[in-house]
Image (cartoon, helix red, strand yellow):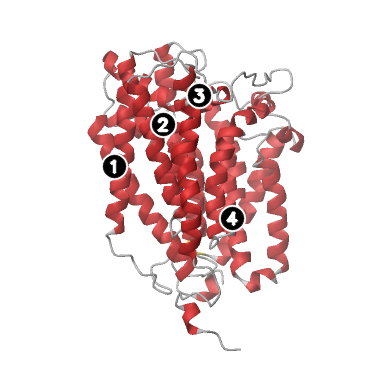
Amino acid sequence: MAVDARVGAGVPRAGSVPRAALSRALAVPLVLALVGFLPGYVTAQPGGDGVRDAAYWLQLTLTVYAGGRLAAMVLARRRRLVQGAFWLFVYVAMGVAPLAQEVIGQVPTPVVGPRGDTTAALALVLVGCAAFDVGALLARHRPAARARKGRGVAQVSRRRLWVLVAVAYVGGAYSIVKLGGPAVFFDSRQAISESVQAGGLGGDGQSHVGSAFVRGFGTVPALLALLFLTRWMITSRAARRSLPAIIALGGLVLLNAIVNNPVSNPRYWFLTVVFALLFTAFPRSPVMYRTALVTGVVAALLLFPFLDRFRYDSGGYHPVETTSVLEPLTVKDYDQVGMFANTLTYVHSGAGHTDGRQLAADVFFFVPRSVWHGKPVDSGVRVGQWMGMNNTNLSSPLWAELWLDFGPVGMTAGFLALGYTAARADRRYAQRTQEDGRPGTVAAVVIPLVCGYSFILLRGPLLQATGRIAIGALCLALVTTFSQDRRRILR
């Protein structure tokens, strides 16, 4: 049967609806909802002690700006995974949620400094967002690197993938046994913490490293092995006919249902799992991409605060009691703007910038404090201790991390580089999933994973995020090859 050559060249078949027409049909209601309706609905709610000062107007400006950029990501012709995740986070966590807090005059974490520090924090967030956009624009003008068949492209080694699968099973089994069996993973995060203490993995600083290693070793290899096998299955007929691959995939699905479920894991990690799986399993679906971003907004605003139910057992759980539709947005998950303002106040109080010491602690997180005397604690804990908080498990958004280390110039440069890198990663993902459909392409799995994990990196603190990054990097190094021998790579 002959195939119309125009279809392969990108010319739509007769009678089909062009993608641009679909975009135009979605554009008006989507932009109106994200830029106009939702911010307008929030500001129109009967508030508490909210004031309409410079900080309020900057917050509203940030929300509208992020809403416009998120709409642009959703309607983009190409799927921009990492940039889309960035603007989804900014719109929800730095935009709508703190705008609701401004309106009703209620914040999840105390803001201890003067109102001017909140105003400055919002202005710096806007500067960082603008720098991100400039970086992405600069990346657009760089010629795209063409994928060379068999040359310079990171591929998955067939033999070493099976080694990763074995590591995933061993790591998952060890984590399950060490923490008290499968049942504890469906109880609560409090039950997991108690199992950690009972297993001798909690208490002092080194024990916290041990518990993080056990959890990371049990979750990250299992997720990566599942992603690589999923990619292999959807792109290779040979994989779908391989009984060992089918059995391994089924076992990994069950293992991930235990160790990576939303009950026993932080909500941001489960969000990572969902986004990585969706964009790995549906690499060419614009519908899935757009649905994920739009649904992400709805879920983050309406469902995310109530998923705190899984943090505690039935005795320790206190349900969200609200008299306003906005009050669930004042929970601790959305304290990013307030914590950035507190970071500014902390530095202005005389502590000063750390000149990269916080970042050094993030990079060399594995160095024990017995060796590195005076090793910095994570930024959220550092500022929380200065504030006198009993609970120092506080966020430290990337804006605060960069500003604490390097000041406004360094923060701006950091977001410029971040925007450039995100745009390059999105272009690479498009090349590897559309132009280069090889099953073993590493970028087709890594970039969806980075997209999901970016929520954790943007929320911070960075020190808490580096353990899983290191384990993931080791897993990737294990399976990656640049060999041109087709017998050694997935196909």
Mark with earlier residue (1, 4) = 1
- Disc 4 target residue: 227
Q: Residue at x 34, y 45 (%)?
A: 418
Q: Secondary structure at mark 2?
A: loop
- Kindly report which numbered mark, 2 or 3, lies closer to the viewer in this rendering: 2
* Observer-nearest of 127 and 425: 127
Where is residue 118 drawn, in percent x and y? 35, 21
Residue 397: assigned label: 2
* Residue type highlighted by circle 4: Leu
Structural distance between the alpha carbons of marks 2 and 3 = 23 Å
Q: Secondary structure at mark 1?
A: helix
Mark with earlier residue (2, 4) = 4
- Disc 1 target residue: 131
Contact between marks 1 and 4 (CB within 8 A): the answer is no
Where is residue 299 drawn, in percent x and y? 59, 38
Where is residue 27 drawn, in percent x and y? 46, 52
* Observer-nearest of 407 and 40: 40
* Residue type highlighted by circle 3: Gly
Contact between marks 1 and 3 (CB within 8 A): the answer is no
- Disc 3 target residue: 205
- Kindly report which numbered mark, 1 or 2, lies closer to the viewer in this rendering: 1
Structural distance between the alpha carbons of marks 1 and 4 = 32 Å
Residue 449 visible? The answer is: yes
Residue 373 visible? The answer is: no
How packed mark 3 is, by other alpha carbons closer than 10 Å (few <14, some 14-19, many 20 or more), is: few
- Return the residue found at the far top: 388
* Residue type highlighted by circle 2: Pro
Structural distance between the alpha carbons of marks 1 and 3 = 37 Å
Structural distance between the alpha carbons of marks 3 and 4 = 32 Å
Q: How many marks?
A: 4
